[in-house]
Amino acid sequence: MTGGISDNDEPATAEVQTLVEQVKDQITGKMNGTFEVFEAITFRSQVVAGRNYFVKIHVGNDKCIHARIYKNLQREVSVHSIQEDKTREDPITYF
């Protein structure tokens, strides 16, 4: 069913980590930077015409980013938006 973002953060799965790796170049390009690590920690999802993944990504030290990754019905993956300067404690919200 289409609708809002899932209620709870879920631990990142291998599928979510694969999505993050597929869009790493898009994210680093938008942020003009490189990262020490690039590890999905938790995520929420939203069913649309495809699926949005709202992913908390550890990028080194105590820093995280939140990325909204869209996977369409043809399984093409792209970055919709990014929130910078996040911590492990910051909740994932709709953006």
Image: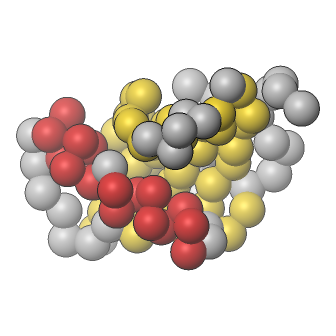
List x then y, in percent, for residue 78.
Answer: 39, 37
Judge left or right: residue 27 versus residue 29: right
Q: 61 or 30, which lies in front?
A: 30
Please identify the residue farthest to the right as the structure is shown: 1
Q: Quadrant of the N terminus?
A: top right
- Give the color scheme: rainbow, by chain, secondary structure or one colour: secondary structure
Q: Residue at x 20, y 50 (%)?
A: 25
Q: Position of residue 40 (x, y in %)?
A: 48, 65
Left or right: where does residue 33 sit relative to residue 24? Answer: left
As drawn, 93 above or below 23 = above
Q: Is residue 86 above or below residue 34?
A: above
- Residue 88 in sight here: no
Would you say residue 1 is visible in this rendering?
yes
Q: Which quadrant of the figure has residue 24?
A: bottom left
Residue 14 image-quadrant placement: bottom right
Q: For this view, does 57 lie left or right of residue 5?
A: left
The number of numbered discs placed on residues in the rendered structure image is 0
Residue 85 x, y percent position in the rendering: 35, 43
Q: Residue at point 26% right, 43% down? A: 27
Where is the C terminus found, in terms of image quarters? top right
Picture quadrant of residue 16: bottom right
Identify the residue shown where x is 72% and y is 36%.
46
Q: Residue furthest front?
A: 74
Q: In this rendering, is residue 87 above or below 91?
A: below
Task: Report the residue at 81% width, 51% height from top.
Answer: 8
Question: In the picture shown, does residue 44 fall above or below 47?
Answer: below
Residue 15, percent from left and from top: 56, 67
